[in-house]
Image (cartoon, rainbow, N blue to C red):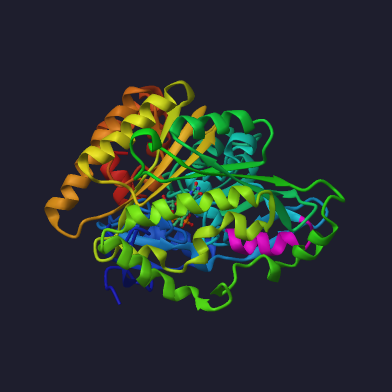
């Protein structure tokens, strides 16, 4: 038990999802807003800092605090209300995407925006303004938040919506936990008429083909996402397998009504009904450490042709959205160094040139991501937005365990960041570990940064809310 405060903070190892950033910190798991207020008051009195933390799914340092305390909000996880007629939910911040869809689907609703894992909390989803595979169509998570309640570091409870405290509403969403703690949210879900989606696998022979498919299907598909084999070179640079998924219209899939049962959405515990999923990561660890990632990517790309021939096929919402949850602890394959993800957002007009340059730089430095994911985006109205009218390419890098290798990877990512910044691109802080403070103003523009800093000074004059990310960016 840490002795710095009288509240029951306990020392724990607090890391980002990538495991390579973080360390011991005193952690408290409040169950009520009053306990959060007490923690704010006590730590502020002692001149310390607090990082807010949801499910800890941010890859880097967004929810770690090497220099202070951590409030883990996962125990504030009550679903306060769900209206089966409208699909509107009232939730505490620790309610997860999984909790929400499991509650909604039986009534014929599904969250409007979900991430690639269902472990994410509602507070973390709002604070990072997460996006799904339908960002180009339905927008970001913040766009389905009707309102929320914010506890400011000064102890005030503020109701925020598009009509009330509109400036704060648009700054807290995407404001990476800097302005206060979201203690309650009202969230809209959307109607679904089947427990299944109609899915197509489409082989893209190179980067330009991938981008062309995104443009061609943008007004037609409900979801689009492309897995990229970033090991492909020459004519195959940027090749991959695009997935398009469409929702069913009323009456189109009578059998699919059965799949509105949450039990039929959950990812199965065994692969092919035989192999426990927990056994997969050691095999993947072997691929990473025996340098077989290029081969695995090639095999996956070849398998795409078969999937394309068999398309379209029907898949549950859960299986389509939460592919990564099929393999528990998959990120352990990158141990001992861990992983970082680098996800630049690039304007549409610069997409092909910039993304091609980034992939080529990966080949030159031999830091080739083991996973690449391409998505189409649209702008959103939030102050610290990372969205653009264009594309994002999420690149997962295994971090070398030695100091010099790690530094070389960071240099490589910063070098790529320069290319992105030069093209007017942005970055997503849930997936960042490398950006410098100088990039922060460049990404958002001086006016926006000034407005954000002014709000921060007003609501948090003692700079109580800090994370390793906020200190790195000089917020
Ligand atoms: C496997 C995997 C797949 C992913 N796929 C996607 C994807 O498809 N799309 C996408 O957009 N993201 C994706 N992510 C990233 C993830 O959605 C974000 O990092 C999200 O913010 C994580 O939520 P969390 O609850 O874990 O929050 P944390 O990571 O714990 O915290 C995130 C931020 O929210 C702040 N915060 C947390 N709770 C509160 C609160 N109550 N009030 C105010 N601030 C708070 C924290 O201070 C921190 O800055 C993925 C992550 C993983 C691990």
The N terminus appears in which quarter of the rendering? bottom left
User: Is 321 placed left or right of 278 in the picture?
Assistant: right
Residue 106 sits inside the magenta stretch: yes
Q: Which residues are magenta?
A: 97-108
Residue at left offset 32%, top offset 34%: 358
Quadrant placement of the C terminus: top left
Q: Position of residue 378 (x, y in %)?
A: 55, 31
Q: Is residue 438 above or below residue 18?
A: above
**Given the current orientation, which residue lies at the most extreme left position?**
404
Report the label total: 0
Q: Nearer the viewer, residue 65 or 166?
A: 65
Outermost residue toward the top?
349
Q: Main secondary structure of the magenta part?
A: helix
Q: Position of residue 118 (x, y in %)?
A: 55, 60
Q: Is residue 177 covered in magenta?
A: no
Name the one closer to the observer, 64 or 4. Answer: 64
Q: Is residue 391 left or right of residue 290?
A: right
Q: Closer to the camera, 50 or 461? A: 50
Whether residue 150 is visible, yes or no, is no
Point out the residue furthest to the right here.
251
For image coordinates 62% across by 64% down, the residue present is 99
> x and y percent of residue 238 in the render?
41, 37
Image coordinates of residue 381 in percent, x first then y, are: 56, 30
Q: Is residue 1 left or right of residue 113?
A: left
The residue lying at 82 percent from left, 61 percent from top is 255
Q: Is residue 382 above or below residue 88?
A: above
Report which quarter residue 365 is drawn in: top left
Residue in front for this viewpoint, 111 or 363: 363
């Amino acid at each position: 038990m840490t002795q710095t405060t009288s509240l029951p903070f306990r020392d724990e190892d607090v890391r980002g999802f990538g495991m390579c950033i973080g360390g011991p910190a005193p952690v408290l798991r409040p169950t009520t807003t009053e306990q959060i207020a007490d923690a704010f008051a006590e730590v502020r009195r002692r001149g310390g800092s607090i990082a807010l933390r949801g499910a800890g799914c941010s890859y880097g340092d967004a929810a770690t605090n090497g220099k202070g305390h951590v409030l883990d909000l996962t125990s504030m996880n009550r679903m306060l209300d769900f209206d089966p007629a409208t699909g509107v939910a009232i939730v505490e911040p620790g309610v997860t995407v999984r909790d929400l869809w499991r509650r909604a689907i039986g009534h014929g609703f599904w969250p409007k925006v979900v991430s690639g894992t269902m472990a994410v909390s509602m507070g973390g989803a709002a604070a990072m303004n997460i996006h799904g595979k339908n960002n180009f169509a339905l927008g970001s998570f913040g766009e389905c938040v009707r309102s929320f309640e914010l506890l400011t570091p000064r102890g005030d409870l503020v109701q925020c919506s598009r009509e009330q405290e509109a400036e704060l509403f648009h700054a807290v969403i995407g404001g990476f936990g800097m302005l206060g703690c979201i203690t309650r949210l009202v969230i809209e879900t959307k109607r679904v008429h089947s427990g299944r989606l109609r899915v197509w696998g489409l082989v893209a022979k190179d980067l330009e083909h991938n981008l062309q498919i995104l443009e061609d299907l943008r007004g037609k598909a409900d979801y689009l996402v492309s897995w990229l084999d970033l090991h492909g070179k020459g004519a195959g640079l940027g090749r991959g397998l695009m997935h398009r998924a469409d929702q069913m219209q009323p009456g189109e899939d009578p059998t699919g009504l059965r799949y509105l049962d949450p039990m039929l959405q959950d990812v199965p515990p065994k692969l092919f009904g035989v192999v426990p999923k927990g056994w997969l990561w050691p095999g993947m660890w072997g691929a990473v450490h025996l340098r077989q990632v290029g081969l695995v990517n090639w095999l996956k790309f070849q398998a795409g042709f078969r999937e394309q021939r068999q398309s379209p096929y029907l898949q549950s919402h859960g299986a389509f959205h939460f592919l990564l949850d099929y393999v528990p602890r998959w990120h352990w394959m990158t141990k001992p160094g861990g992983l970082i993800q680098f996800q630049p957002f690039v304007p549409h007009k610069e997409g092909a040139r910039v993304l091609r340059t980034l992939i080529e730089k990966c080949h030159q430095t031999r830091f080739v991501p083991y996973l690449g994911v391409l998505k189409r985006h649209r702008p959103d109205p939030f102050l610290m937005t990372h969205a653009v009218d264009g594309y994002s390419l999420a690149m997962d890098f295994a971090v070398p365990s030695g100091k010099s290798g790690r530094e070389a990877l960071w240099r490589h990512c910063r070098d790529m960041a320069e290319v992105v910044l030069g093209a007017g691109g942005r970055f997503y802080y849930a997936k960042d570990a490398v950006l410098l403070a100088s990039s922060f103003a460049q990404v958002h523009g001086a006016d926006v940064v000034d407005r954000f800093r002014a709000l921060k000074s007003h609501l948090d004059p003692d700079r109580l809310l800090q994370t390793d990310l906020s200190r790195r960016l000089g917020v």
